[in-house]
Amino acid sequence: MMPRYRSMPAQPASRVPDEAHQPPDEPLWCSRCNTDQHLLVNSIQSHYPPAPNMVDVAYECHACRYSYEHVASVRRVAAVLNRPGVPQGVLQFGGQYLHCGEPMKTKSCELRRIQAPLVLTPGAQLRMYEVLINTRILGCHCGFRMEIPD
Ligand SMILES: [Zn+2]
Ligand SMILES: [Zn+2]
């Protein structure tokens, strides 16, 4: 668990963006390899306290296997995510899933009927149960599709 520090503002937080109160916007970078060419983003989390376009990003350099975690702007993260040639997996960011560095869009919703073998009480016979689940089909502009339980 990462410690979370909450500041107690003496005044209500201003909605006006104030550059002076922005956390530092560090680029995604492997200081061991001195390059950002081998970085794979593992996760993006909302930053606390909320700052415009700032996220907590965790990534790994797959050349030296060193992992990093710090605050960066969405623009910095996108610079690595949108780079061609490096396959990036699906990322979860808040309630959204990202692929190719962009939030995936809901294509359709479906009600799926799934047959699942279940043993409800220990020692009982294995029985097939029918389960209905709502799923959402998410799609990326590159053609990648993913189905998730709603
Ligand atoms: Zn490295
Ligand atoms: Zn994609």
Image: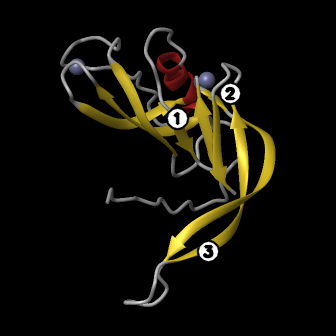
Please name the colour scheme applied to the rendered image: secondary structure
Q: Is mark 1 within 8 Å of ligand 2?
A: no
Q: Identify the image quadrant of residue 132.
A: bottom right
Mark 2: which secondary structure? loop
Label 3: which residue?
129
* Numbered mark located on residue 140 in the image: 2
Residue 58 image-quadrant placement:
top left
> Dot 1, crowdedness within 10 Å: few (<14), some or many (≥20)?
some
Q: Which residue is mark 1?
A: 90
Mark whose residue sits in front, 2 or 3: 3
Residues 98 and 24: in front is 98
Q: Secondary structure at mark 3?
A: strand
Q: Residue at x 35, y 11 (%)?
A: 37
Asked which secondary structure carries label 1, the reply is loop
Q: Quadrant of ligand 1?
A: top left
Residue at left offset 56%, top offset 29%: 74
93 or 9, which is in the foreground?
Answer: 93
In the image, taking residue 132 as reference, residue 20 lies left or right, namely left
**What whole-number distance in Å separates the C-alpha atoms at marks 1 and 3?**
31 Å
**Label 2 CB less than 8 angstroms from ligand 2:** yes
Crowd class of label 3 (few under 14; some 14 to 19; many from 20; radius 10 Å):
few
Amino acid type of the residue tagged 2 in the rendering: Cys
CA separation in Å, label 2 and label 3: 33 Å
Q: Earlier in the sequence, mark 1 or mark 3?
A: 1
- The quadrant of the rendering that contains the C terminus is bottom right
Amino acid type, label 1: Val
> In terms of sequence position, does the residue under pointer 2 or pointer 3 come before the other?
3
The kind of residue tagged 3 is Tyr
10 Å neighbourhood of mark 2: few (<14), some, or many (≥20)? Answer: some
Closer to the chain start, of discs 2 and 1, is 1
